[in-house]
Amino acid sequence: MSSLRIFVTRRIFPEALDLLSPFAELEVWPGDYPPSPQELREKAANAHGLLTNVMDRLDEELLDAAPELKAISQVSVGLDNVDLAEATRRGIPVGNTPGVLAKATADLGFGLLLDAARRISQGDRWLRAGNWRLAYHPMHWLGAEVHGATLGIIGMGQIGLEMAKRGRGFDMKIIYHSRTRKPDLETQYGLDWVQPDILLSTADFVSLHLPLTPETRHYIGEAELRSMKTTAILINLARGPVVDPKALYTALKEGWIQAAGLDVTDPEPIPPDDPLLTLDNLVISPHIGSASVDSRRTTCLLAARNLAAGIQGNRMEQCANPEVYRALGL
Ligand code: DGY
């Protein structure tokens, strides 16, 4: 019997578990809903490894409750649910899964962009409600042109780049803002770096690809929404709180911008009585950016490989706090 113990906080692809079972005793939380903070602390109390996802809160209290913890591995890119600084201080490597889900997430993002522009979900809701009585009218159901429009990407990481590539496929002009310029990408994909105020005031589509940090909370608020074109469409694939939901509601209701497509909300799940859900110029998907079968399988496998390495004292393939390896001499 192995002396290493792993707690997996949700069911994942069996082939990912198969990577871990040869050298560790696994316990998988069977419920679809996450363990409560108390239950998570109890499960973590004698675990050497945790395989987690975005709904699990990995804070100082949890880390205090897990004295034997050697590694955390999360099935996501975003780690805003993890106290990364505290894990680093304790020498615990934290794995995440960049790269393997960027294309699937950008596919979904482009789907939201097309949907918000051409009002696909809105039309679907309308006709299912029995409203389609006039087969065609030249002035009905007009939407925004996508090809030839300007796509403004905020955050040029892997998902931002995949959005840019899809935009190029639609003959869009691509402008972007990120803290560091990417001259190679600019040349290769014909991207123009601009300041955020220029991006917001000139883009026809603004697509957000920022991690959630104290600095990026409400990055898009009233002032930013008012500075956008009245014909602009906002896409958020990042994290819900990157956009101020009250300001977004007013912007969509009063026509400061034309429409929005969100894969993330604040809070999640969005309550059924949230005022945003009364708006027709908004399409929302339930945080499914990476949810293609292949992408989720590959992501779970990477998370399992990260944990396998971390728990056995080896370097993870993708580690969000590689500085811990200095202390470990790796
Ligand atoms: C990510 O990888 O961060 C996705 O949003 C799933 O949580």
Image (spheres, grey):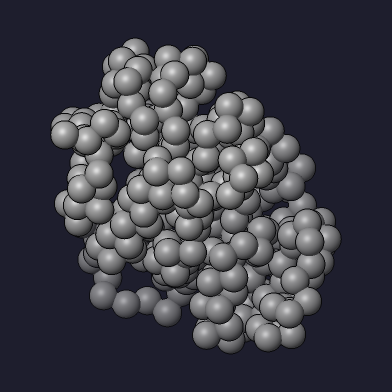
Asked where in the image residue 83 lies, by quadrant, the reply is top right
Left or right: 119 as drawn, with respect to 226 = left
Q: Residue at x 25, y 62 (%)?
A: 293
**Is any atom of residue 41 visible in this view?**
yes
Spot occupied by residue 167 in the image (x, y as percentages of width and height): 56, 77
Q: Residue at x 66, y 58 (%)?
A: 155
Spot occupied by residue 97 in the image (x, y as percentages of width and height): 45, 54
Q: Nearer the viewer, residue 106 or 330?
A: 330
Residue 90, compared with residue 95, is above or below; it is above
Q: Residue at x 66, y 83 (%)?
A: 189
Q: Nearer the viewer, residue 205 or 125?
A: 205
Q: Nearer the viewer, residue 2 or 121?
A: 2
Quadrant of the image for the N terminus? top left
**Is any atom of residue 232 visible in this view?**
no
Left or right: 253 as drawn, with respect to 21 = right
Asked where in the image residue 173 lies, by quadrant, the reply is bottom right
